[in-house]
Image (cartoon, grey):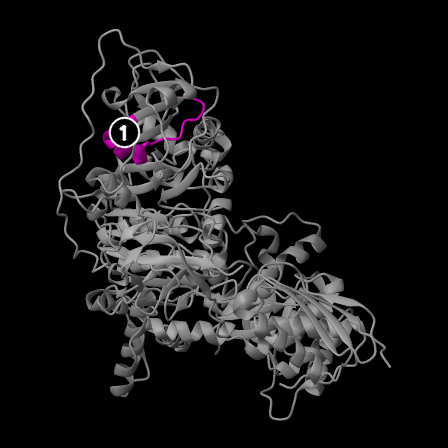
């Protein structure tokens, strides 16, 4: 069922976030491992943003490693979408 | 007529620059998918620019995206970017009117119902582009300006690029003339030495003198100086107000002919005065009528 | 334990274990001096007696340095300092315990201090600025007693008036003669002004000069005079020049920082300050230093000559002096080689002590004569209170230095900051650690707008008339949160790890231990 391949998008530059995705084992759900320079202040928010993008794309059973350097929501969304795209996830059109 | 005194390039794969683009108060910001982005990152940059267009507040700046040329990634760029409602697309390396027509069709297909039509600016960077400038300017009603890119152009000519710009003088004039003949704006090539403030001012003065309406910028530090040059000066505004006053007086007296300082004021002079006052009022430099 | 609320609304205990009774901050100019200066014991040196000691051990024995003493140091050798570690190593070797280190600023090079605290050699720290492993260790609760954080002016005042009693002052001297005359402009470790060592030299019970460059008597120029120096010790090396002076300090290339700097210069101009006799202070890096570049342009365009620049002197300010834009430089600390060179050779470049620079309890410090000062901040709140002590995660990464002093003295105090530092909004409802009170802060300049303290209606009018984009500070806060999202507040533990004193000795806030 899982046709994803490992993929990465984003950089470690300031204001960016590096997202690496890999297929997860069956029924493993969405697992997010997060490192961030603003973990205390925005850790929860970052996880939610990543998870929301993945859920909107109807992707299940995925492992995500995120290394954050203070990225805003729009950047987190963009990098997650790019990583999913590169991983071969079929992308629903993102709503405007 | 839109204000395009400065058009600032922002690298399309750089979140820090994209999210701060509105801070620099350029008349237009150009989110760049072409030269600023490596081929293997074009897809990621598309997503980043798409999200930025949707969420970043660019204030009053016109939102322009420089897509890739038709012979590489233009199609994917247009499909991804147009629905995100940029104001304008900057098309690089335009060589013939058909390039514009093709882009216009692709853009039309990608626009969503009710979306304001996306405008186009043709970037002329090659001898062919310069040779076809007038026809390119008239190729489609979406085209609102011609821009000139000197770096690629001089490389194609095999000439040395200099600050004084003798090697691009002819091309600059052609771009200005072609745009004016087609009733659209012309935008000058960027000044690439970001540390040479005197050079930037001189180059921008020359551009204004030649008839360009604005200049491409590659660094936010350049914007204020570019605006200073393109803004009407106090003397120009003063002169323009006196011209309009003279014309109104003449009309009031039933004469169609006005003169100021011993010179006849004819239609082209009035047009120039009106444009100066329009710009001046827009920028808060001149009083409202 | 009863809690007090000081005049900016910070909650403080009445008494802090290891510090003493808390005198709460009551306003920038409310608390008045009510004491005499303290005076060290009178000593004499007979003709023929020598000051040169063989080594530090000999000095320790002769004084003698005992458990519980307060040893003081200046920070003019910055991150190239070798003296603090050298002296503490001797103290440790000799089995001393419970010492207090009064070092005007702590840098990463002072990391060995952490070990000395762990094994009880050092139990107290008194300083104006902390960075590096020591700051981390303080934040994690390593020190048995709270650290005392002062301002540069406040430290001078505390030493002069007896609140900071120094047993032995160890003065790192880039150049010295055998009778204890010292300067900072000669020798391989030349650092410029020795301003922060001046109160120590004048008021400590014992003064020890440590130098790696002994010159024949009499030394000239003289920054610290022989009449207060007990011992002179020559060592191989007092510090690493690469860590002391940074070549030349460079202004930021960040376009957002440059925009902020340019706007700052416009604020100064709109305030009507760019005129003959203008006086100015700014920070050594980032947007603060960039502001100097734009202020310079405005001064050149207006064709005016400034009276003086103050600080914290960098090569950039030296250039302005040399091109006639300022008549004088008043120098309490040199940051780079140009500052050192200029101090050594230009009579219009003045060296002053910390008290002259910034003390609130004397008949007028230099900061009082400032027209404009440009300062940084890690956080600012909607009452314009500033945090320069703790970073966003609660760890100590700075200190007032001269911040509160300059802010109090200057006619117009401008704080420059990116609205978002990375993702973090700089404007909070309440800063984590108040350092400089809002009543002394006039303008906040960010890349997305300028906020004027409501107390300054006069300034507001002028800036508005000049066409600057003004926004209420609350609006800027909301804008930042719209862009970045509302940050979760961090929590700290109860234990107080540092007491933050305002320049007059009252307590403006405390720092609590971080959760690790």
Whether residue C161 is situated above or below residue B279 in the rendered picture: above
Q: Answer whether residue C192 is magenta in the image.
A: yes
| Residue C307 shows up from this direction | no
* Residue B208: x %, y % from top left: 47, 62
**Quadrant in the picture for the N terminus of chain C:** bottom left
Q: Is residue B141 left or right of residue C227?
A: right
Secondary structure of the residue carrying tag 1 is helix
Residue C351's image quarter?
A: top left
Residue found at the very far top of the displayed protein: C48
Whether residue C276 is situated above or below residue B145 in the rendered picture: above
* Residue A28: x %, y % from top left: 78, 77
Q: Is residue A25 left or right of residue C483?
A: right
Query: What residue is rendered at 54% in x and 66% in y?
Result: A40
Q: Answer whether residue C459 is magenta in the image.
A: no
* Residue B272: x %, y % from top left: 40, 73
* Residue C472: x %, y % from top left: 32, 73
Query: What residue is rendered at 35% in x and 30% in y?
Result: C342
Q: Nearer the viewer, residue C106 or B183?
A: C106
Q: Chain of mark 1?
A: C
Query: What residue is rendered at 45% in x and 34% in y?
Result: C245
**To which residue does mark 1 refer?**
C201
Q: What span is in magenta?
A: C186-206
**Quadrant in the picture for the C terminus of chain C:** bottom right
């Amino acid at each position: 069922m899982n046709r994803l391949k490992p993929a990465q998008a984003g950089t470690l530059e300031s204001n960016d976030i590096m997202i690496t995705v890999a297929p997860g084992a069956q029924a493993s759900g969405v697992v997010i491992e997060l490192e961030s320079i603003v973990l205390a202040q925005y850790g929860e928010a970052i996880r939610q943003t990543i998870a929301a993008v993945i859920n909107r794309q109807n992707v299940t059973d995925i492992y995500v490693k995120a290394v954050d350097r203070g990225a805003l929501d729009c950047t987190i969304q963009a990098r997650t979408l790019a990583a999913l795209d590169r991983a071969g996830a079929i992308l629903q059109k993102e709503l405007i | 007529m839109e204000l395009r005194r400065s058009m600032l390039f922002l690298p399309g794969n750089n979140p820090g620059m994209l999210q701060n683009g509105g801070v620099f108060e350029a008349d237009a910001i150009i989110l760049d998918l072409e030269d600023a982005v490596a081929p293997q990152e074009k897809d990621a940059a598309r997503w980043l620019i798409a999200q930025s267009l949707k969420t970043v507040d660019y204030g009053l700046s016109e939102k322009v995206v420089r897509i890739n040329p038709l012979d590489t990634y233009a199609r994917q760029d247009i499909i991804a970017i147009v629905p995100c409602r940029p104001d304008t697309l900057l098309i690089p390396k335009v060589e013939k009117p058909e390039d514009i027509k093709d882009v216009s069709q692709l853009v039309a297909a990608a626009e969503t119902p009710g979306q304001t039509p996306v405008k186009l600016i043709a970037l002329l960077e090659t001898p062919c582009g310069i040779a076809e400038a007038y026809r390119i300017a008239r190729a489609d009603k979406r085209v609102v300006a011609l821009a000139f890119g000197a770096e690629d152009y001089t490389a194609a000519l095999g000439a040395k690029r200099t600050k004084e710009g003798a090697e691009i003088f002819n091309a600059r004039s052609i771009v200005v003339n072609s745009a004016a003949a087609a009733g659209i704006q012309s935008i000058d090539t960027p000044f690439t030495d970001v540390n040479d403030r005197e050079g930037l001012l001189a180059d921008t003065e020359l551009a204004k003198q030649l008839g360009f309406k604005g200049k491409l910028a590659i660094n936010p530090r350049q914007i204020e100086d570019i605006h200073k040059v393109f803004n009407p000066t106090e003397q120009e505004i003063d002169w323009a107000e006196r011209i309009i006053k003279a014309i109104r007086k003449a009309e009031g007296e039933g004469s169609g002919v006005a003169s100021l300082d011993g010179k006849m004021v004819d239609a082209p002079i009035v047009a120039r005065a009106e444009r100066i006052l329009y710009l001046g009022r827009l920028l808060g430099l001149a009083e409202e009528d | 334990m009863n809690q007090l609320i000081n005049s900016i609304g910070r909650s403080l205990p009445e008494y802090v274990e290891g510090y003493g009774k808390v005198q709460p901050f009551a306003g920038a100019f409310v608390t008045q001096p009510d004491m005499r200066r303290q005076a060290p014991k009178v000593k004499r040196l007979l003709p023929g007696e020598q000051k040169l000691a063989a080594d530090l051990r000999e000095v320790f024995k002769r004084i003698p340095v005992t458990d519980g003493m307060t040893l003081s140091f200046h920070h003019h050798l910055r991150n190239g300092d070798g003296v603090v570690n050298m002296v503490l190593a001797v103290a440790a070797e000799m089995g001393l315990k419970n010492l207090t280190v009064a070092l005007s600023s702590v840098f990463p090079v002072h990391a060995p201090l952490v070990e000395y605290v762990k094994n009880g050699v050092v139990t107290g720290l008194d300083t104006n600025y902390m960075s590096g492993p020591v700051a981390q260790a303080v934040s994690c609760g390593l020190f048995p007693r709270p650290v005392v954080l002062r301002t540069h002016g406040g430290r001078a005042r505390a030493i002069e008036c007896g609140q900071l009693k120094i047993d032995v002052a160890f003065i790192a001297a880039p150049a010295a003669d055998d009778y204890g005359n010292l300067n900072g402009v000669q020798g391989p470790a030349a650092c410029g002004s020795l301003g922060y060592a001046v109160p120590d030299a004048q008021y400590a019970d014992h003064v020890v000069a440590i130098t790696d460059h002994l010159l024949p008597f009499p030394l000239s120029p003289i920054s610290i005079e022989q009449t207060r120096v007990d011992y002179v010790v020559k060592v191989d090396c007092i510090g690493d020049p690469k860590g002391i002076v940074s070549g030349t300090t460079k202004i930021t290339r960040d376009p957002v920082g440059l925009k902020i700097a340019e706007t700052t210069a416009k604020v100064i101009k709109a305030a009507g300050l760019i005129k003959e006799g203008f006086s100015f202070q700014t920070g050594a890096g980032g947007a603060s230093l960039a502001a100097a570049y734009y202020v310079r342009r405005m001064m050149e365009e207006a064709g005016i000559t400034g009276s003086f620049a103050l600080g914290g002197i960098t090569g950039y300010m030296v250039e302005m002096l040399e091109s006639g834009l300022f008549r004088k430089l008043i120098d309490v600390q040199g940051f780079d080689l140009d500052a050192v060179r200029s101090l050594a050779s230009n009579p219009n470049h003045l060296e002053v002590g910390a008290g002259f620079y910034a003390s609130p309890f004397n008949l007028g410090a230099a900061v009082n004569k400032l027209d404009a000062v440009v300062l940084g901040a890690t956080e600012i709140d909607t009452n314009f209170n500033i945090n320069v002590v703790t970073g966003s995660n609660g760890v100590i990464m700075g200190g007032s230095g001269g911040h509160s002093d300059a802010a109090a003295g200057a006619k117009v105090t401008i704080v420059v900051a990116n609205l978002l530092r990375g993702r973090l909004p700089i404007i909070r409802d309440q800063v984590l650690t108040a350092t400089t009170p809002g009543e002394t802060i006039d303008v906040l300049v960010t890349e997305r707008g300028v906020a004027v303290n409501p107390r300054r209606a006069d300034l507001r009018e002028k800036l508005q008339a000049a066409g600057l984009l003004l926004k209420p500070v609350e609006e800027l806060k909301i804008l930042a949160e719209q862009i970045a999202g509302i940050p979760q507040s961090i929590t700290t533990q109860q234990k107080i790890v540092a007491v933050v004193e305002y320049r007059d000795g009252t307590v403006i806030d405390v720092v609590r231990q971080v959760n690790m």
